[in-house]
Image: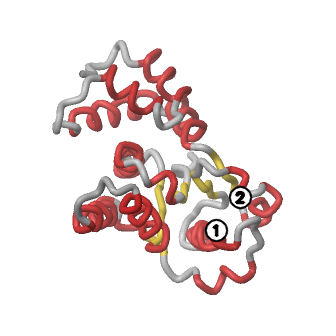
Amino acid sequence: MNPPPLVFLDACVLFSPLLRDLLVRLGKAGLCRPRWSREVQEEWILARLNTGKEPDRRELDAAREAMNDSVPEGLVSGYASRVEGITLPDRQDRHVVAAAWHSLFSSPATHGIILTYNLRDFPKKRLAPLGLTAQTPDRFLTELLESHPEPFLEVVRQHIAGLSHPPVSLEQWLTDIKKLKLHHTARRVTGLSSPFPLP
C-alpha cells in the first residue's frame, strides 16, 4: 500500500485558518503528511498581520506552534543549501521548493506535492526533476476525498464540531470552503455526506 501523500503547504494555503486547520487534521488522521517550514509560517503570519484585522501577533504565533505540536514531523528544516540550485520565475519562492524537495529525503515517498493557489509560480518543468508537482488545494482535497471517503468525512465532522465560536453547520462550512475556491471539494462532500452524522 502506498504511503499517504507528502504535501508541502505554501503560505497562501496556510493563510486561511479554516483550510489550515483542515489540512492539519487530515495530517493527524494519517490521510496525508503535511509539511511546512519556518519561512512559510512567517509568510502567512505577516500576510495576516498586513490585513489589519489581526489584533495580536501572539495569537498567530500560538496558532503556528499549535500546528507544530499537532504534526511534530511537519516542520521541515535544514534545506538552505538546496535553495541556490533551484530556478523559478520568482526567486522568492525558491525556499518553498527547497523545503519540499528536502522533505523527500527523510521520507519513504519518491514524490511530493506543493500545495498552492499559485501554480504559475511553480512550473512543472522545474519541479519534475526533483520529484515534485504543484497542485491546488481543491484538486488535492478532491482526490483525497475520492480515495478515502469515510475517513475524510470523519475529519470533516470533527472539523465542524471544533468550530464552536460560533457554531458552524455543514451548510455554512460548505459555503465557507467555496469562498476558498474549494468548489469541487464542496460538491463531493455534499454528494457523500448524507450517510454520515454531520452537523
Residue beneath disc 1: 93
Q: Nearer the viewer, residue 69 or 119?
A: 119
Report, in whole angstroms, how far the alpha carbon at label 2 lies from the one at label 1: 8 Å
Q: Which residue: 48% across, 49% down? A: 32
In the displayed structure image, the side of residue 164 where residue 57 appears, left or right: right
Q: Where is residue 26 in the image (x, y as percent from the top left)?
A: 40, 45
Give residue 89's position: percent from left, percent from top.
76, 65
Question: Which residue is nearer to you in this view: 44 or 116?
Answer: 44
Give the farthest residue toward the bottom.
81
Q: Amino acid under label 2?
A: Phe
For label 2, the SS is loop
Image coordinates for residue 28, horizontal then vertical, percent: 35, 51
**Residues tagged 2 and 1 counted as in contact (Cβ below 8 A):** yes
**Lower sequence index among marks 2 and 1:** 1
- Residue drawn at 47 percent across, 66 percent down: 43
Q: Position of residue 199 (x, y in %)?
A: 24, 21
Examine the image and state in which quarter residue 19 appears: top left
Residue occupied by mark 2? 122
Amino acid type, mark 1: Asp
Which sits in the foreground, 35 or 1?
35
Q: In this view, does 108 lie to the left or right of 164?
A: right
